[in-house]
Amino acid sequence: QAGDLVFGPAADVDLMQVAIDWYRWVMGDGEKPPFLDAPVKYYVTGAEQWRSAPDLDTATTATMPWYLVGHDGPHSAAHPGWLRPEPADSPSFRFVCDPDERTTMLLEQQPSPAGQSHNPLMDLPPSYHDLGAHLMGVDPTSPVFVASIDGFGAVYTSARLSEPLELVGEPQLDAWVVLDQPDADLCALLYELRVDGSRILLSPAVQRLRHRDPARGVQLMVPGEATLVSFRNFHWFARRLAAGSRLQLAVRHTGSLRMDRNHHTGRPDGFETPDDVRVANVEVLHSGEHRSVLHLPIGRASER
């Protein structure tokens, strides 16, 4: 169990015993554990089944693009944009990254009803909301970091799925962004929004925009220029989404007590003071040559 997310009986595997049996087999004192029938073994939540694959890449059979589509007027968690399988020109979404904004920090001082698994690296009690921990998959059923996004991020929701959808692998978000400062921190949160309104975090990613292309080193954003920002560090995951569920993507600023504060100047860490703080205005584009798109990893629908 993770937060309010309860796994099926098949998830209950004595991994310590599997490891012991494997060592015995390697040392010539036993049979190979039947559980280890392939180099990669992964658990598909929702389907509540173990699957096997020769490698992680093979577990993903295809990718499916879902385009981010905006609308006129205010947008929020209650009035989101859309995720659609077909591109459509639409208005951009704007939001603010303010290092002095305290909404997220105040939330992190409130108890989480589902609680969180204890993590010795975290100073906060394990029963409190924590965006930094949420980005590591802790408390995956918490809705607060989407519900509180008003003005500080953008939310996109798909239509209801007509049939189950199995996702296995790493998503990628290619977002066209216009910034009015040299730098900002954004995170992307991908959820399954279930029929009863509850959410399950599928995969998160976080990106400091000046490090958007690690191979090319530090690249400051050019204020006012449309720039492709690719979130390539989503967590690998495996889940079968139920028919009737929706996909939901939130793109928001960080602003967590547990995360480094970005002053948005573009200067190196340690060379900034509180007086250097700048508010960054973010615009996510959805039209023409600047269509933002979420690439979802598709898994095979039947058990191997």
Image (spheres, helix red, strand yellow):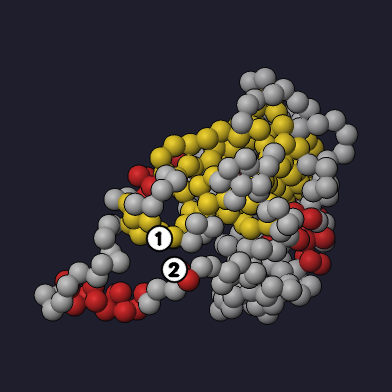
Q: Position of residue 266 (x, y in %)?
A: 66, 45
Q: Is residue 133 visible in this depiction of the protein?
A: no
Q: Is residue 161 above or below residue 35?
A: above
Name the foreground residue: 267 vs 89: 89
Q: Picture quarter containing residue 100?
A: bottom right
Find residue 122 and name its label. none
Q: Tag 1's secondary structure?
A: strand
* 97 relative to 161 in the view: left or right: right
Q: Is residue 234 above or below residue 92?
A: below
Q: Is residue 37 visible in this depiction of the protein?
A: yes
Name the foreground residue: 122 vs 171: 171
Q: Position of residue 234 (x, y in %)?
A: 53, 50
Residue at which label 1 appears:
50
At x 75%, y 26%, the residue is 90
Query: Mark 1 belongs to which amino acid?
Result: Trp
* 94 relative to 294 in the view: left or right: right
Query: Mark 2 belongs to which amino acid?
Result: Ala
At x 51%, y 68%, the residue is 8
Find residue 10 and name its label. 2
At x 63%, y 63%, the residue is 140
Q: Earlier in the sequence, mark 2 or mark 1?
A: 2
At x 17%, y 72%, the residue is 31
**Residue farthest to the right, as pictured:** 73
Give neighbour class at mark 2: few <14, some 14-19, many 20+ (Cα, 10 Å). few
Q: Position of residue 212 (x, y in %)?
A: 56, 41
Name the foreground residue: 145 vs 120: 145
Name the foreground residue: 126 vs 199: 199
Q: Position of residue 167 (x, y in %)?
A: 50, 47
Q: Tag 2's secondary structure?
A: helix
**Do residues under tags 2 and 1 come within 8 Å of each other at their CB atoms?**
yes
Q: Picture quarter containing residue 30?
A: bottom left
